[in-house]
Amino acid sequence: MSSNDRYKTISVLLVGAVILSSSLAGYYFYQFSLVSDAYSSTLESLDGLSYEVDLIINFGNGSTSYFNQTIIPIGFNMYNATLFATDGRVDATYFPEFDAHFVNSIMGLGGDEGFGWSAWAFDERVGEWRALDVGADLFILKDGQSIAWYYQSFNNFGQGKPN
């Protein structure tokens, strides 16, 4: 085989590889477009079935976790949203007579003598945080709401700011 024939063979193989690569790239781009459209459509359909909330967890030691724009189903309460946002990393005791949970720990923090978790919601009417006067199970969330858990001394419950 002459060197000229080798160059022709290599050229044909390279052109074939470019055509094959271009075809595969086009195919995968088309598949990506289909998935992207389906994802957008799913998000649009969820708008009527879900809310976005912002959840703050203040560990009381200077560290805070933020779960901003967490998408939750309509009807979720603060306890459900906390379980959802933290991937179930909540230890709580259920009291059937109150149909409520007492939160012992969130994300591994809790159980210290004289300390506990207080539940808060941001009151947009007055522009400040307010400690909840009901349990987290009874606090049904609204779209766009900001809520917080604050690990603090029982002596200071409902005082300070969770953010």
Image: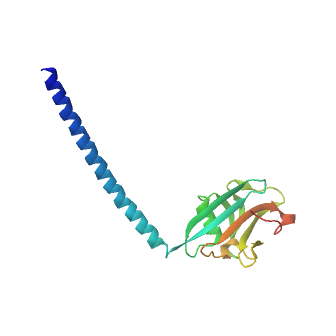
Q: Quadrant of residue 31?
A: bottom left
- Where is residue 80? Give x, y as percent: 61, 68
**Residue found at x 61% / y 69%:** 53
Residue extending farthest to the top is 2
Residue 49: x %, y % from top left: 50, 75
The quadrant in which residue 83 appears is bottom right
Residue 150, placed above or below residue 127: above
Can you give x and y, in whole percent of width and height, for residue 143 in the image? 59, 74
- Frontmost residue, 12 versus 52: 12
The image shows residue 18, relative to residue 41, as above or below, that is above
Location of residue 68 (image quadrant): bottom right
| Above-or-below relation of 5 to 147 | above
- Identity of the residue furthest to the bottom in this view: 125
Q: Residue at x 33, y 53 (%)?
A: 29
Which residue corresponds to the image point at 31% horizontal and 56% vertical from the top-left?
A: 30
Q: Nearer the viewer, residue 104 or 80?
A: 80
The single residue placed furthest to the left in the displayed view is 1
Q: Quadrant of the N terminus?
A: top left
Q: Residue at x 49, y 73 (%)?
A: 47
Give coordinates of residue 112: x percent, y percent: 80, 55
Left or right of residue 68: residue 14 = left
Question: Outermost residue toward the front?
Answer: 4
Quadrant of image for the C terminus = bottom right
